Amino acid sequence: MAAQSPAELDEIWEKEHVSKILPSNVRHRDLKAYIEGLKKTGVKVAEVGRSFSQREIYQAEFGKGPLKVFLWSQMHGDEPTATSSLIDLFTILQKNRDKEWVKRIESAMTIRAVPMLNPDGSEVYMRRNMQGLDINRDAIDLKSPEAQLLKKLRDEWSPHIGFNLHNQGALTTAGPTAKQAAISFLVVYGDAEKTMNDGHERNRRLASAMVQSIESYIPGHIGRYGDEFTATAFGDNFSAWGTPVILIETGALYGRPEMFLVKLNFIAIGTALKALADGSEKGFDPARYELLPNNSSGRLMNVIFRNASILNKAKPNEVTTADIGANTERRRAEFLSPTVIRRIGSLTGIAGLEEYDASSFYAVGRFQPLTSGSFAEILFYKKDREVDWSVADLEKAVPPDAIFSLGKWIRGEGVVPKK
Ligand SMILES: [Zn+2]
C-alpha cells in the first residue's frame, strides 16, 4: 500500500504550497486571489453565498467518490490558519492527480470545503460577523446569513464527516504544564450525554492518525479541546444532525512562524484524508487521541519580569517588589501587537514564554504608572544608580539602562538578564 507519510506530505507542502501571505494578514481580496489560483489549476470552486456585508463565500470541491467529507474554516474572523491550509490542500491534490495516493482519495471521496466562512469578520480581524453575532453560537437561531449558509450546505449534502477549523489562544497549554498547545483536537459529540456511535469512533481513530502525523514536530504541544456540549455551536449540532465533526484548534508555538502551523494543519488533514481513502484509519488506536492532555489555561503568560522593584515616579519612596506579567493581544502580523500588564504580584506557578530576572532593577512606567491593565511600557534602571525621579522628562533626562516597549527591548537588550 502506497502510504503517504507525514514526511512526504511535509516535502510536498514545502515544494508546492501557494499560501504565501501570513494567514493573519489574509484579507478577503487575498482569498479571492487564492480562489482564482485554485480555478486556474482546475479545482471546482463556486460562490455559494454572501456574508452580511455581501462578501462572496466560496466552496471548493475535489474528488468523485461516495464518502462525503466537509471542511470549513474561519467562522471566527480572527482565526485564520486553516484557511491557508485548505487552499494549499486543494491546490496540491489537484496538481498531483497522477499520484497513486491522490487517485485513491479522488475515487474514494468527495471533499468540499468553505475557506473563510466569515469574510466580514476576517476583514477587520474580529471573531464575530458584521451583525456582532458569533456564528458558532448561531447554529439553532440562524440569525446570520453565514450560519444559514453553513446549515444549508450541510443539510443539502449530508456529509459523512466534518472538520471544523479554528484557532485558540496562544497561551492555551497542553495539560497543566507551561507547554503551549500548538494544535488541539476534539472529536465532537452530538449530545450532552456523550453518546458514542460509529462515526464518533471512526473520528477518534482519525484524530489519533492526525496526532501521530504531527507529534514528532511538536512533542508535548498537542492538547485535547474541552468537550462540554454547547447547544448552539455548529460542531455539536453537525454531529447531532448526522455529520460527526472533528474540531481542530490551532494555537501558537513560541519561536515558530504562522506558516509552520499552516503546514502542520496540511499534514494532519492530508493524513486523515489518506487514512479514510485507503482504509488505514481502521488500524489506528483511538487511545492516542484519548490520552491527549486536556487544554488548560492560566499557567502561561507572554512575558514575566521577576522580582522587579516597581517604582511610581510620583511616590518614589513606596517601592514594591513583585513580578510583572504581561500578555500580547492577538493582531494581524502586519500590525504592532500591544502588550498589556495583566498581573502584578507573585507569579509563582505561572511561566512566561519569556522571563527576565529584574531583581537588580527599578521598573518604572514609561507613560503611566505600572498597574494591571496598563501597557507594558517599562523603563529599567539599575538599582545602584542615583536617580532624581522628579525630573520632567525622565527617559530623556536620565536615560534608563533598558526599555521594554511593544513586546520587545528597544534599548539595552540583554541588560535585564533572561531567566
Ligand atoms: Zn473559533
Image (cartoon, rainbow, N blue to C red):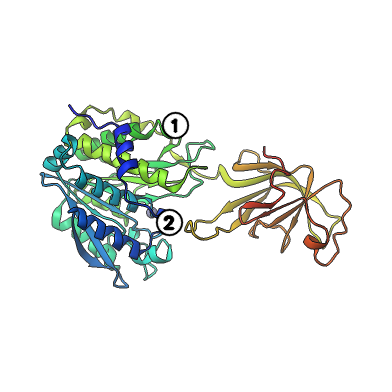
Q: Earlier in the sequence, mark 2 or mark 1?
A: 2
Can see residue 141?
A: no
Q: Does the residue labelled 2 lie within 8 Å of ligand 1?
A: no
Q: In the rendering, which numbered label is found on residue 81?
A: none
Image position, residue 264 (x, y; %): 36, 41
Residue 160 against residue 214 in the figure, above or below: below
Q: How far apart are marks 2 and 1 (CA)?
A: 25 Å
* Crowding at mark 2 (Cα within 10 Å: few <14, some 14-19, many 20+): many
Quarter, ligand 1: bottom left
**Residue under the image location 28 percent in, 64 percent down:** 146
Q: Quadrant of residue 395?
A: bottom right
Image position, residue 156 (x, y; %): 14, 58
Quadrant of the snapshot with the N terminus: top left
Q: Is mark 2 on a helix, strand or loop?
A: helix
- For mark 2, what is the residue? 24
**Residue under the image location 44 percent in, 46 percent down:** 251
Q: Is mark 1 on a helix, strand or loop?
A: loop
Amino acid type at circle 2 is Ser
400 or 207, nearer to the observer: 400
Amino acid type at circle 1 is Pro
Can see residue 135?
A: yes
**Residue under the image location 30 percent in, 61 percent down:** 33
- From the image, state whether disc 2 or disc 1 is nearer to you: 2
Disc 2 and disc 1 in contact, CB within 8 angstroms? no
Left or right of 62: which side holds 18? right
- For mark 1, what is the residue? 219
**Residue under the image location 85 percent in, 59 percent down:** 389
Image position, residue 100 (x, y; %): 16, 35
Left or right of 35: which side holds 183? right
